[in-house]
Amino acid sequence: MSIRLDACAWRPIHTRIVLALGIGWALDSFEIQIVGSVIGPVGQSFHLSAQDQTVWYWTVWFVGLMVGALGFGYLADRVGRRRLFSATLLLYSAAAILTALSWGWLPFLGFRFLTALGVGGEYSAVTSAMSEFVPARLRGRTGALVMNFWSLGGIVAGIVGIVFIGGVLGPQGWRYVFLFGAVSALYGLYVRRVIPESPRWLAARGRTDEANRVIEQVSGIAAEHVRYDRRGLRLRFRASLAELWRSHRGELIYGMALDFSEASAYYGIFSFISVFVLVPSVVNVSSATVPWYFVVANLGALAGGLAVAWALERHGRRPTVLLAYSAAALSTLLLAFSASEHSPALTLAAMTVAVMFASAAWMSAYPTFSELFPTHLRATAVGAIVGVGRIGAILGVVALAETASIFGLWSAFLTLSGLWGIGALAAAIWRLRGREGRGVRLETLANGSAFAEA
């Protein structure tokens, strides 16, 4: 079945699928990164201190992401990728609009939790689907390019923050920012038209005629028969997790280590910089200027993602992931030095470099670990990995806030660098013993052992 998908040339339908998945990823990014621009005005509206607001907001958000990734990931394996695209988008679109109408801090948190459920589901569905349509020789590059739409969403979030938070609509401008979530609903309708169901998922469910039609649509290559594997067609959630732990433990731990590292450190950067660095006592930047920092930093993220898209296919997954996580750890120390100099220009430059390598790290991770699992477990595995990562994000945000408050900025930055070091260590072990996925068919990767021959 997969031979036609892997052997075909790049076709217009591949471009449409990548754009559709990428736009969804950009909208997810917008929902997350806009917080850097609105967190101050939201706190003023509800009379909250910056630190209390940050800890509570991110804790609720990451719990929602964790639950959404686990729950919707399992559903994506049971009912299909395509249905989940629309369901998760419509959920977080409605919740984002309700966020704009929040009448108090607790309703605000409740609506952001619902938004996070949808975004977490997107992680599982999009990450699984993006590897199941693309020829094996282009899978890593394409996955990284889809991930790179995250940077575009961050740039849009910064620009929207500048327009709506920078005095145009006054202190309540943050409400209009969240109304941007309505765009996601329109996108949900577009996705239903453009992206077919994953042919690998259809074949795994025994729907061979439908799978064959989609394969012909995507590859342009006709065939009479489609073979499929009936394993796991009716696994329940606990049974799916048990099979992952029993048969794919090495891959699962590797993915969890990478995602724990990147989530705790990446989100830590954005929440930490907004509250503890870009403030009058450290780097004197006005609240109206903060969104510009995120716009410029996401230009760095865009560069990092494009570099990873090239490196994953040119040099392979294992060396690329190791280099990206190691560089992210080192660039954090450069940011610490710049912040200690209290220079806005130097801090902006160092923040851009740090975000560039941070984005390179996580954008190299998702295409790498998502291809290591069989089709009937892929979305569940991604959901479990993302769920563990969101636990790391909660710990990272809280740990950095507490460390900065008690021990100072340098201690917090060293903690941040150490969080990246967890992923670098996991990547170093996998570099020595793990399988390389560059150019290898998904079915071959999924059927291999966790570690390559020494």
Image: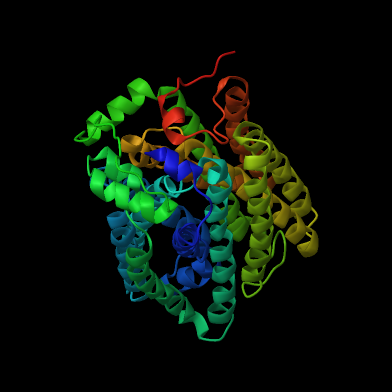
Residue 214 is left or right of residue 34, and the answer is: left
Question: Can residue 209 be seen here?
Answer: yes
Q: Image quarter for residue 419?
A: top right
Above or below 4: residue 116: below
Q: Which of 444 and 52 is in front in this view?
A: 444
| Residue 80: percent from left, percent from top | 28, 49
Could you tell me how many numbered marks the image carries? 0
Q: Coloured how? A: rainbow
Image: 139 above or below 192: above
Residue sitting at x 45%, y 40%? 389
Residue 329 % position (x, y): 68, 39
In this picture, is 309 found above or below 110?
above
**Residue 422: which quarter of the image?**
top right
Residue 245 placement (x, y as % from top left): 35, 24
Q: In this view, does 331 lie to the left or right of 171?
A: right
Residue displayed at 45% across by 20% down: 449
Q: Residue at x 30, y 26 (%)?
A: 243
Q: Which of 318 and 13 is in front in this view?
A: 13
Image-quadrant location for residue 89: bottom left
Residue projecting furthest to the top:
454
Query: Could you tell me which quadrant the N terminus lies in?
Result: top left
Q: Can residue 411 be seen in this view?
A: no
Of 26 and 436, the residue lying toward us: 436
Expressed as whole percent of the image width and height from the top left, the position of residue 236 reads: 20, 35
Specify the quadrant that holds the C terminus. top right
Q: Is residue 427 left or right of residue 81?
A: right
